[in-house]
């Protein structure tokens, strides 16, 4: 199939951010006596928006988070991003070499996504090509965000290719009627076993192979 639009998730796909985010969340919740670990974060929070994560914490641990918790967590996270955040290897030339339009659809807040993309040299994806969960009623795994991005970019869902790392995002893309490839090269998935059971139509561990999977997506097609 010839695709008309490529939709990239942000965290864990364009930027290698998931381990940083998980570490900061674990540390901040630990100050309140909530003990979670990386496997718990991966299972319950990967690919989900901040409000959904906080609702899970409140429900499972029966804790009322103080009003200042979100601001403190976000501030510390962005400080960590400024110091540690890196772009995924080989993703910049892939974006530059696409023969079709692309955009970003992320569960992150818009300020966080904008800063993250700018920090790694992908600030040109901000503006009208950046779509966040705050734009729709239901975030991933609902299809709303991907469908909203496709409409805004003028593409039919069936002709969209989504690049995701999380099971939550894969479910959202499939629910939207889109083709989805799972990127497994982020540091948070290193050593993880992935296969057909994740629901993705394809998977790859390095953006260096991106145009080998579908040469028609390259600018020379």
Image (cartoon, rainbow, N blue to C red):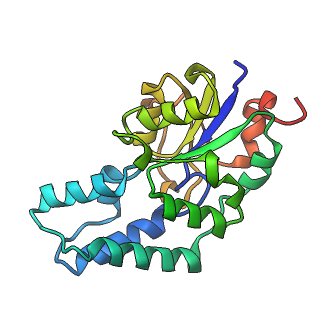
- The residue shown at (42%, 31%) is 197
Measured as percent of width and height from the top left, residue 75 is found at 42, 77
Closest to the observer, 86 or 118: 118
Residue 190 in view = yes
Q: Is residue 106 left or right of residue 62?
A: right
Q: Nearer the viewer, residue 191 or 22?
A: 22
The number of callouts visible is 0
The residue under the point 21% across, 54% down is 56
Up/down of 184 relative to 70, above or below = above
Q: Quadrant of the C terminus?
A: top right
In-image side of 92 versus 161 (left or right): right
| Quadrant where the image shows the N terminus | top right
* Residue 195 visible (yes or no): no
**Residue 186 at x, y percent in the picture:** 56, 56
Please give left or right for residue 140 compared with residue 216 in the image. Answer: left
Residue 215 picture location, percent across and down: 80, 30
> Above or below — where is 6 with respect to 93?
above
Q: Quadrant of residue 141?
A: top left
Q: Determine the image quadrant of residue 182.
A: top right
Q: Quadrant of residue 180?
A: top right
Q: Position of residue 191 (x, y in %)?
A: 50, 54
> Quick one: 155 or 219, which is closer to the camera?
155
Residue lying furthest left: 62
In the image, what residue occupies the spot 65% across and 58% down? 88
């Amino acid at each position: 199939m010839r695709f008309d639009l490529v939709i990239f998730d942000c965290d864990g796909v364009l930027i290698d951010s998931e381990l940083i985010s998980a570490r900061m969340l674990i540390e901040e919740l630990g100050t309140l006596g909530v003990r979670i670990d990386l496997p718990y974060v991966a299972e319950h929070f990967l690919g989900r928006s901040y409000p959904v994560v906080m609702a899970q914490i409140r429900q499972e641990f029966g804790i009322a988070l103080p009003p200042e918790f979100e601001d403190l967590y976000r501030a510390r996270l962005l400080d960590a991003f400024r110091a540690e955040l890196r772009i995924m290897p080989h993703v910049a030339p892939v974006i530059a070499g696409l023969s079709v339009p692309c955009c970003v659809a992320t569960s992150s807040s818009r300020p966080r996504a904008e800063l993250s993309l700018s920090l790694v040299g992908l600030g040109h994806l901000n503006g009208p090509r950046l779509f966040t969960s705050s734009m729709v009623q239901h975030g991933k795994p609902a299809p709303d965000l991907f469908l909203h991005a496709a409409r805004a970019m003028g593409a039919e869902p069936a002709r969209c290719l989504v690049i995701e790392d999380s099971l939550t995002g894969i479910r959202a893309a499939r629910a939207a009627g889109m083709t989805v490839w799972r990127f497994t090269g982020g540091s948070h998935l290193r050593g993880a076993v992935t296969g057909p059971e994740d629901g993705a139509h394809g998977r790859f561990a390095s953006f260096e192979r991106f145009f080998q999977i579908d040469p028609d997506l390259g600018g020379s097609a």
